[in-house]
Image: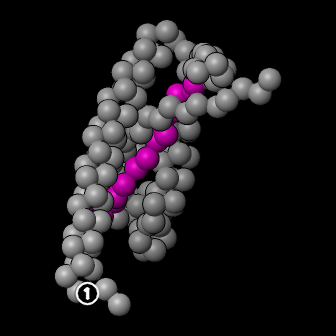
Amino acid sequence: MRDLAQILRELKSVRDRKDALKAQSNEAQKAIDALTNEASEAYEAMGASSITLEIGGQEYRAGQRVTKYCSLEDPVAFGAWCEANDLQAIAIYAPNASKLKSLYKERDEDGDSLPEGVRTYEKIGISFTRKKG
């Protein structure tokens, strides 16, 4: 059996490595976010949502996707809006994310105004799909 001091030294070493990896991961995520925003602006300037390109001898389709989200920001205002629009059942059953998203999507597609008390936002993602061949 190893002595306690050895175990604690190893534990400290592993925690330090984990912290360093977490810091690297956070920095990588910042770079990913910045590059995603830059790519999104380039896609918009091109009027495209995907392109095909070669990376490391492989052909990829790089596509941009924009996903709409919403969250309940003011439950009182949302409840009043539901009552005014005869949708009390939604307010009573404490809307979860999927119910809010489907309500948002339905109203957005119909061109209706969005519910009061609901905050909307978009997330942009870039995906890479390797082409077969």
The figure's colour scheme reads one colour
- Single out the residue that lies furthest toward the top: 46
- Does residue 64 show up magenta in the picture? yes
Query: Label 1: few (<14), some or many (≥20) within 10 Å?
Result: few
Q: What residue is rendered at 40% in x and 50% in y? A: 70
Residue type at numbered disc 1? Asp
In this orientation, which residue lies closer to the viewer: 47 or 113?
Answer: 47
Kindly identify which residue carries mark 1. Answer: 3
Is any part of residue 23 visible from this angle? yes
Q: Which residues are magenta?
A: 62-78
Image location of residue 9, percent across then percent down: 21, 73
- In the rendered view, tell whether residue 10 sits above or below residue 41: below
Relative horizontal placement of residue 40, taking residue 110 as reference (left or right): left
Quadrant housing the C terminus: top right
Pinpoint residue 105: horizontal percent, then vertical percent.
Answer: 53, 45
* Residue 117 shows up from this direction: no
Mark 1: secondary structure: loop
The image shows residue 44 at horizontal and vertical percentages of 45, 16
